[in-house]
Amino acid sequence: MFLKVAWLVMRKDLTVEVRSREIVYTTVFFAVACVLVFAFALVKEGRPLEDAAAGIMWISVAFAGTLALGRTFERERHSETLRALMLAPVSRPAIYVGKLLGIVLLLLIVEAVLVPLVGLLFHAPIWNRPLLLIALLVSGTVGFSAVGTLFAAMLVRARSRDVMLPILLYPITIPVIIAGVRGTAALFEPVPAVDLAQMWLALLAFFDVVFVTLSLWTFEPLMTE
Amino acid sequence: MSFDFTEVAVRDVSRHYGRRRALARVSLTCRSGEVLGLLGPNGAGKSTLLSILATLLAPSTGQVCYGSHTAGQAGPALRARLGFLSHDLHLYPELTARENLEFFARLYGVEAVSERVTTALGRAGLTARGGDVVSGFSRGMRQRLALERALLHEPRLLLLDEPFTGLDDASVAALVARLHELRATDRIIVVVTHDLDVAERLLDKVAVLKDGRLVAFDDAHGRIREHYRAHVAVGDRCS
C-alpha cells in the first residue's frame, strides 16, 4: 500500500506537469540562464576557468531545484489539495515519498539539459565516466530533494515561504552540494580520479539514507499541525 | 478500515495559536442522521473547530471522541470515515473531473473505482464533462464535483466549510436536496455557513460561536435567527 500511494501521488504530479509544463519550462530556462551567466563571467577567449564546471553545474541544480520545489508545493497550496492528501487514510510518509519522486524526476529532466550545456561551455569531459557521473547526479539530487520536499511541504502555508525555503534548505544540504561538487570535479580531471569520485558517491549515498530517513520520520508530525 | 461510529462528541476543546485563543472550552455532540450548523461572525473559531473535527489540527486541550475513540486512538482508519469539503474545494484544476475522482478514490482504497466514479459524475450532473479539465468548470460545477469527491468513500462524518458560497439559487437548492438525501442515510453532517435562509431549511442543531466560545447550542427548529440575534452583536458579519 505504501508504494502504491507513493506511485499514485508521483503519477498525479507528473500528469499535472505534463498538462501544464510550467515547472519543467521555467526550471530549465532558469538553470540554462544560470549556466550562461556563469559562462559569460568565467569563460575568457573560449577558455573556461579551471575546475569551475562542477561547481557551476551543482549551483545551477540547487537554484533550479529550489524553484521547482517552491512551484510544486504552490500548486498544492492553491486549491489546498495538500490538506486533501493529508486527510486520506494512507501513510503520510508515502505521500512524502510520492512528492519526492516527482521532484527528483523533474530535476533529472533539468539535469539532462544542464549537464551537456556545462560540458559544452566549460569544456567539461562529461563522457569520461558517464555512469559514475549519472550516479553522482542521481544521488545528489535525491539528497537535495529529500530535505527540500520536507521543508517545502512544511512551509506551504508560511507567508514568507519563498524566502524561508532557501534559507533553511541551503545550509542543511551543504554536505550534499560539497560531495556532489568534489565527486564531479574528480571525474572532470584530465585523468579522471575514479577512486575519489567513488568515495564522494559513497558519502552522497550515506547522506541520502540519513536525509530520507529523517524526513520520513518527521513528515507526519510536522504536517499534522 | 472497519472503524465506525454513530456520534461525535467535542469535549472541552480549546485551541491556541501562540498566545491567540481560537477556541475556548467548546463542548457539543452530533449524532447519525443529524445536520449540525456552526454559525458565528468572522474569527469566531468555526473553521478551526472544523479542522479539529477533520483531524487536521490537534486541540490544545480537550478531546474529540468519534464513538468511543479519539483521533489518536483510531488513527488512519478514522480518516477513512471522514469527508471534508473545504471552501477551497480540494480539486486539481489541471486534471479532468474523472481523473480527480479516480485519484482520490484510489487514495481512499475505494473498490470498483471506475463504476464508483461514473456514478459520482452522474450525481454531480457532470457525466458529459467527465473528460474536461476542472479549470474550465464554473464554481457550481466544481462545488458539485468536490462534494462527490468528499463522498466517494462513503464517509460517516461529512464536514462542509461554507459549501453554499458563490452558488446560484438553483445550485444551492440542489446542494440542500443532496444533503437531505445524505442525512437520510445516517450520516453525521457538520456545516459552517453564513446563509441563515439555507440554515433554516437544513439544520437539525445549531451551534453559535463567538470569539472562540460556544455561546449557544440547541435544536435548530425555528430558532436559528433567534439564537443568532441573541448572541451575535449587530454589525458582526456572519461567515
Image (tube, rainbow, N blue to C red):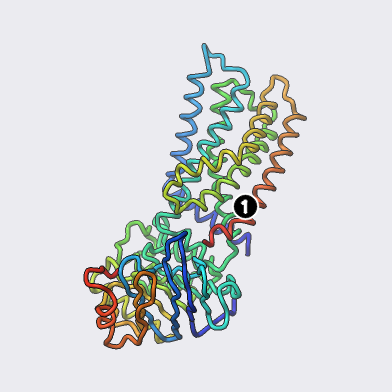
Which residue is drawn at the image coordinates 45% and 79% (left, top)? B27
Which residue is drawn at the image coordinates 75% and 29% (left, top)? A196
The residue lying toward the viewer, choosing from B1 and A169, is: A169
Quarter location, residue A58: top right
Q: Amino acid at mark 1?
A: Ser
Quarter location, residue A126: top right
Residue matched to label 1: A215
The residue lying toward the viewer, choosing from A132 and B198, is: B198
Say few, some or many: other residues with alpha carbon within 10 Å of mark 1 (under 14 / 14 to 19 / 20 or more): many
Residue lying furthest top: A45
User: Is disc 1 placed on a helix, strand or loop?
Assistant: helix
Residue lying furthest right: A195
Which residue is drawn at the image coordinates 59% and 72% (left, top)? B72
Picture coordinates of residue A54, whole percent (x, y): 61, 27
Q: Is residue B185 visible?
A: yes
The residue lying toward the viewer, choosing from A9 and A156, is: A156
Picture coordinates of residue B131, whole percent (x, y): 39, 61
Q: Is residue B99 visible?
A: no
Q: Which quarter of the rendered picture does the N terminus of chain A lie within? A: bottom right
Q: Chain of mark 1?
A: A
